[in-house]
Image: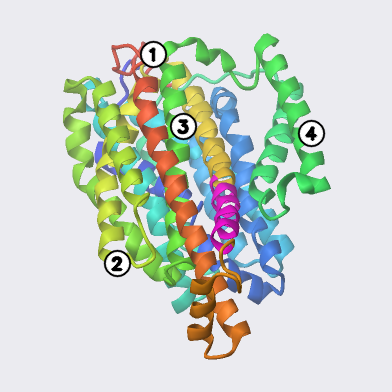
C-alpha cells in the first residue's frame, strides 16, 4: 500500500473536494429566504414550509456520526463520490417537487447523503497533502465553511426574486456531477482497505430516534412554545431515553456504530469542546443579526444579507496566509486571538441602538471576520492532531455532528432568550405609561392629536422595538463573555498539533 498517495493533479482534486463541500454547506442556508415563496407556490402555510429546513437538518444530524462506520464499509473515495452524486440527484428531485410532502421527503434524503461529505472532504484533504501543507488545506475548508452560509441567503434571494425557487436546488446538479467526476478520476488509484463491520442495530436505531427527536425539538421548540406543548414534551422524553440507551450501548459495545472512545484523546476532546461552544456562539451571531436588521431596523432580506456579508472578506483574504504560516506558531495562541476578537465584536454589538447606520453594522461584521479567519483552521488542526489517520474520518464526522447540534441548540436558545427578554423589558418600560404620569399623558396627547387609541398604539410599537433592542444588547453581552471564557478551554489541549500521517495515510 502506498504510504503517501498523491493525486495526479492536486489543485484540481482540491477544487473538486472544496466545491462539493461549498455546495453542501450552502444548502443549509440557501432555502431559508425562499420559504415564503415555496409555501405560496405549493399552497401551504409558512409554519409547514419550515419543515423544508427541519427535514434536511434532522437527516444530516443523524448521518454525520455514522461517517466512521460508512468509511470502513465503503472507503473514503467511494463514499464521497456517491454522496456527492446522490446529493446532486436529490437536489434535482427537490426542484421538480410538485407538493410540500414530496419536497420534504427529498430534502430529508438530501440531508442524509450530505452528512458524510464535509468530514470525508476533511479526511481526504489531510491525506493527500504533505504535512507541511495540511494547514493550507484545512484553512481552505474553513473559508468554505464561513463563506457558504453567508452566500446562501443572498444567492437564495437573488435566484428566487429573478428566476424561480426550484433553481436554488437545480444549481447543485452541475456542481455535484463535476466534483464527483473530478475526485473519482483523480483518486481512482488510491488504495483503500474496506471492512465488513457488523451493523450495530441497537446503536443505529437509538441514534436515529434520539438525534432525530432532539433536532425536531430544537427546530420546533420556539414555534410550539416549548414545554407548554404536549408534542415537545413527548418528543423530548423520547429523545432523552433513546440517547441515554445509545450512550450506554456505544460505550460498552465491542464494535459500536459511533466510536465514542475517540474522546480518550486529549486534544480531540478539548478541541471538539472549543469548536462546539465557539460555533454555537458564532451561529447565534449569524442568526440574530439578520433577524434584528429585518425586524427592528426594517431592512429587506437582501439588504440584511449585504450588511452581514463583510464577515467573509477577511477570511477570504487571510485564508492562505493563516494556512501557510499557522504551523510556525502555537495554534492555541491563534485560537485565543480569534476568541478575543469575536468576543470584542459581541461587546461592540451590545452597544447597538435603533438609529445605527448600515456602515457601523457592516464594519463590526468586517472586524469579526478577523476572528473567524483565525478560528476554524487552528481549532480543526488541534482536534484532529492526536487522532490516527484511520480515525480522522470518524473523528471529523463526530466533531462536525456535535458542532451542528451545538448550532441547533444555539439557534433555539438565542431566539428564545431574545423573545423572552424582549417581553420582560416591554413590561418594565410600559409600567410608567399611564394617565397618572403627566409626562406620559403629555406624550399621548401630542402624538395622537386627541386620538388616545392611536397614540397608545404608536407608543406600544416604540416600546416593543426598544424591548427587542435592549434584549439584543443583553444577548450579545452574554455571547462576548462566552467567547472570552473559551480562551481557557482551548488551553486544555497540548502540543504537538501536527496531524498524524501514519503508514495508512493512503486510505483505510
Say whether residue 454 is magenta. no
Secondary structure under badge 2?
Answer: loop
Residue 237 circle label:
4
Q: CA distance from mark 4 to mark 1?
A: 36 Å
Quadrant that contains the N terminus: top left
In the image, residue 432 above or below residue 179: below
Secondary structure under badge 3?
Answer: helix
Looking at the image, residue 63 sits to the left or right of residue 204; the answer is left
Of badges 3 and 1, nearer the viewer stands 3
Q: CA distance from mark 2 to mark 4?
A: 46 Å
| Residue 508 in view | no
Q: Which residue is mark 2?
A: 357
User: For the residue carrying disc 4, how many other residues have a C-alpha within 10 Å: few (<14), some (14-19), or many (20+)?
Assistant: some
Q: Of 197 and 391, which appears nearest the observer?
A: 391
Q: Which residue is mark 3?
A: 277
Please provide the residue range marked out in magenta.
Answer: 414-430
Residue 386 circle label:
1
Secondary structure under badge 4?
Answer: helix
Q: Which of the 4 image quarters holds residue 325?
A: top left
- Counting residues from the N terminus, which is met first, the one under dot 2 or under dot 4? 4
In the image, what residue occupies the spot 69% across and 11% down?
A: 253
- Counting residues from the N terminus, which is met first, the one under dot 3 or under dot 2? 3
| Residue 119 in view | yes
User: For the residue carrying disc 1, how many other residues have a C-alpha within 10 Å: few (<14), some (14-19), or many (20+)?
Assistant: many
Q: Position of residue 23 (x, y in %)?
A: 44, 51
- Counting residues from the N terminus, which is met first, the one under dot 3 or under dot 1? 3
Of badges 4 and 1, nearer the viewer stands 4
Q: Are marks 3 and 1 in contact (CB under 8 Å)?
A: no
Q: CA distance from mark 1 to mark 2?
A: 46 Å
In the image, what residue occupies the spot 31% across and 48% down?
A: 348
User: For the residue carrying disc 3, how many other residues have a C-alpha within 10 Å: few (<14), some (14-19), or many (20+)?
Assistant: many
Say whether residue 422 is magenta. yes
Amino acid at each position: 500500500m502506498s504510504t503517501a498517495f498523491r493525486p495526479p493533479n492536486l489543485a484540481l482534486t482540491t477544487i473538486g473536494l472544496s466545491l462539493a463541500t461549498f455546495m453542501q454547506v450552502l444548502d443549509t442556508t440557501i432555502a431559508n429566504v425562499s420559504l415564503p415563496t415555496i409555501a405560496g407556490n405549493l399552497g401551504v402555510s409558512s409554519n409547514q414550509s419550515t419543515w423544508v429546513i427541519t427535514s434536511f437538518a434532522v437527516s444530516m444530524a443523524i448521518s454525520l456520526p455514522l461517517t466512521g462506520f460508512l468509511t470502513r464499509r465503503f472507503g473514503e473515495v467511494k463514499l464521497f463520490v456517491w454522496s456527492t452524486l446522490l446529493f446532486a440527484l436529490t437536489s434535482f428531485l427537490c426542484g421538480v417537487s410538485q407538493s410540500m410532502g414530496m419536497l420534504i421527503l427529498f430534502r430529508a434524503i438530501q440531508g442524509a447523503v450530505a452528512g458524510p461529505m464535509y468530514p470525508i472532504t476533511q479526511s481526504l484533504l489531510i491525506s493527500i497533502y504533505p504535512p507541511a501543507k495540511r494547514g493550507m488545506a484545512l484553512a481552505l475548508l474553513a473559508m468554505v465553511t464561513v463563506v457558504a452560509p453567508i452566500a446562501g441567503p443572498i444567492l437564495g434571494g437573488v435566484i428566487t426574486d429573478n428566476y424561480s425557487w426550484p433553481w436554488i436546488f437545480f444549481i447543485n446538479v452541475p456542481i455535484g456531477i463535476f466534483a464527483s467526476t473530478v475526485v473519482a478520476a483523480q483518486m481512482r488509484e488510491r488504495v483503500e482497505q474496506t471492512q465488513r463491520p457488523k451493523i450495530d442495530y441497537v446503536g443505529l436505531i437509538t441514534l436515529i430516534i434520539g438525534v432525530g427527536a432532539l433536532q425536531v425539538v430544537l427546530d420546533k421548540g420556539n414555534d410550539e412554545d416549548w414545554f407548554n406543548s404536549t408534542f415537545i414534551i413527548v418528543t423530548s422524553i423520547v429523545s432523552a431515553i433513546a440517547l441515554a440507551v445509545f450512550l450506554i450501548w456505544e460505550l460498552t459495545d465491542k464494535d459500536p456504530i459511533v466510536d465514542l472512545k475517540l474522546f480518550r484523546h486529549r486534544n480531540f476532546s478539548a478541541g471538539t469542546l472549543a469548536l462546539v461552544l465557539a460555533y454555537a456562539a458564532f451561529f447565534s451571531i449569524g442568526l440574530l443579526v439578520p433577524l434584528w436588521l429585518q425586524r427592528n431596523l426594517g431592512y429587506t432580506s437582501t439588504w440584511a444579507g449585504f450588511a452581514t456579508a463583510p464577515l467573509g472578506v477577511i477570511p477570504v483574504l487571510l485564508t492562505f496566509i493563516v494556512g501557510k504560516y499557522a504551523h510556525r506558531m502555537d495554534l492555541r495562541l491563534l485560537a485565543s486571538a480569534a476568541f478575543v476578537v469575536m468576543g470584542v465584536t459581541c461587546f461592540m454589538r451590545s452597544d447597538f441602538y435603533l438609529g445605527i447606520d448600515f456602515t457601523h453594522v457592516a464594519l463590526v461584521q468586517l472586524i469579526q471576520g478577523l476572528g473567524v479567519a483565525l478560528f476554524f483552521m487552528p481549532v480543526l488542526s488541534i482536534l484532529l492532531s492526536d487522532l490516527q489517520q484511520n480515525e480522522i474520518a470518524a473523528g471529523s464526522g463526530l466533531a462536525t455532528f456535535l458542532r451542528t447540534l451545538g448550532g441547533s441548540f444555539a439557534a433555539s436558545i438565542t431566539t428564545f432568550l431574545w423573545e423572552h427578554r424582549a417581553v420582560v423589558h416591554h413590561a418594565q418600560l410600559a409600567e410608567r405609561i399611564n394617565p397618572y404620569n403627566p409626562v406620559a399623558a403629555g406624550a399621548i396627547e401630542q402624538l395622537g392629536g386627541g386620538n388616545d387609541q392611536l397614540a397608545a398604539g404608536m407608543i406600544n410599537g416604540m416600546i416593543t422595538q426598544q424591548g427587542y433592542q435592549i434584549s439584543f444588547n443583553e444577548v450579545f453581552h452574554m455571547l462576548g463573555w462566552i467567547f472570552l471564557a473559551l480562551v481557557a478551554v482551548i488551553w486544555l489541549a497540548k502540543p504537538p498539533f501536527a496531524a498524524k500521517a501514519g503508514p495508512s495515510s493512503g486510505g483505510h
